[in-house]
Image: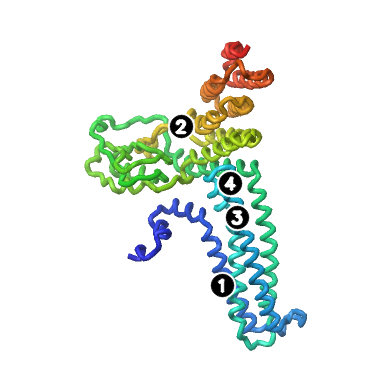
Amino acid sequence: MFLNLLPLSLQKYFQMSKRLRKHEIQSTLWLMPLIYIIISIFLVALTLTLDLVIGLEDVIPPLLHFEPQATRTLISALIGGILTLSAFTLNSLLVVLTTFSGQFSPRMLLNFISDRQTQHALGIFNGSFVFVLLLFLFIGGTSQKVLIATPIMTATLAFITALVFVYFINHATTWMQVHNITYSMKNVSKDIIYESLRKDLDKHRTKDPSNLMEDYQEESHNVLSRKTGYIQLFDYNRMIDEARQDDIILQLHVQTGDYILAGNDLISYWGPGADKVDESKYYEMVEIGYKETEVQDIQMGMHKLAEIAIKALGNDDPKTASNTLHQMADLMLSVDSYITFSPYLADDDKQVRVILREETFDYYIYRGFGYIRHYAKDNHLIITEIVACLAKVAESIDKDKHDKLWNFGCNTIDHIEKQVIYELDKTFLLREVKRLAEVTGHLDDYPPIESKFY
């Protein structure tokens, strides 16, 4: 009943899982300023108590004694000054967001807004404004002859606000630099891999599905989606526990980031206890929303990096595209290190309880480099850089992935028109292809490739 009285913008937070709610709140601009405003109210109460109740005239030197009229003049001037700084900060924020959206990717706006330094800066401005405004209201009719804490706190806060303004401008301009943007995007994706994929899944993954209850599989039951939207989150741990209690195996027909329509297959299950299962509890373990989120979706982070490279190609900025490819190569190492490519999740008794949609290393290579390769087309410099990155990745990962990297590299250069490529472009491209062949153990396959260009 109480939830129905709240605005829809607030109701949605109570309908989310705890993990998704935390992510959404951290991605908004209102929480941190609200915290600073609450802190400023306590500071106002403390300051007024020191001046109007306790009194500090006997312990503070006369040099720091101020008349109420001078204090009111100071505070009234600072109200306008802090409000002006806040307006400039908001304007700078809008400029940054507009630049990100047009030059890089509209999906990157969330990263700058959710950045802790950005949120703290906005919080300090809002908190400072509320502080001086409340002080001005409360000391307006005071009969106190001397004020000490009020002018000192106000001047100190104004000084801090001025420093934060300079810091925020520096932070915004630094954050907008391409190498910082791509590095930040890569680290966000790494965190997703570690927090969501490794901690949630790898402890349950098994490569040996000893018992899949095949005798019951023909009588499997389906759980259908009840609404349309993006798959945002799976509660894997709870799924495994509930499936163990019900003595069933769950098979997921979608993965995080997929778009699903109401009535589409979401989950199927089978096993000895399938006839007694409460399907609604498993449906509640899947979070479906109107937008994609990064909580468990590494693909979204890869798409952001790829979009930066694609926009750079469109703006004739090959250096930005190359920098993005380097960060993508580092991300591939994290994928190889943290992800065990097995779709089977088992309980503590090693019995498979959840079967995921199978993903391979090929899938992540395509998501990482495939989109950039498509838009690069005949840009031989970027194609050469892609092959060079593949060679670097091959040097650092397990040999069982080498064939996949070699095949992707060969497929990348297949479409190049051999007749129109410049001689030096050809030389440097073949040099990287040969290096990839050496690292992946396909040196015997290199001569036929070279013969196509000569």
Position above or below: 15 against 106? below
Q: Position of residue 406 (x, y in %)?
A: 55, 21
Q: Earlier in the sequence, mark 2 or mark 1?
A: 1
Q: Mark 4 to mark 3: distance in Å?
A: 11 Å
Residue for point 55% across, 36% down: 306
Q: Earlier in the sequence, mark 3 or mark 2?
A: 3
Amino acid type of the residue that numbered disc 3 sits on in the rendered structure: Leu
Q: Quadrant of the N terminus?
A: bottom left
Q: Quadrant of residue 155?
A: bottom right
Q: Position of residue 428 (x, y in %)?
A: 67, 21
Q: Mark 4 to mark 2: distance in Å?
A: 34 Å
Residue for point 57% across, 29% down: 376
Q: Which residue is mark 2?
A: 341
Name of the residue lying farthest toward the right: 63
Q: Position of residue 178 (x, y in %)?
A: 64, 42
Amino acid type of the residue that numbered disc 1 sits on in the rendered structure: Ile
Residue for point 27% across, 39% down: 222
**Residue 375 in sight in this render:** yes
Q: Earlier in the sequence, mark 3 or mark 1?
A: 1
Q: Which mark is residue 100?
A: 4
Residue for point 49% across, 38% down: 299
Q: Secondary structure at mark 3?
A: helix
* Labelled pair 3, 2 in contact (Cβ < 8 Å): no
Q: Which residue is mark 1?
A: 41
Given this view, does label 3 or label 1 mark the residue nearer the observer? 3
Q: Mark 3 to mark 2: distance in Å?
A: 41 Å
Q: Residues within 10 Å of mark 2 (few under 14, many from 20)?
A: some
Q: Which residue is mark 3?
A: 93
Q: Position of residue 257 (x, y in %)?
A: 43, 41
Amino acid type of the residue that numbered disc 2 sits on in the rendered structure: Phe
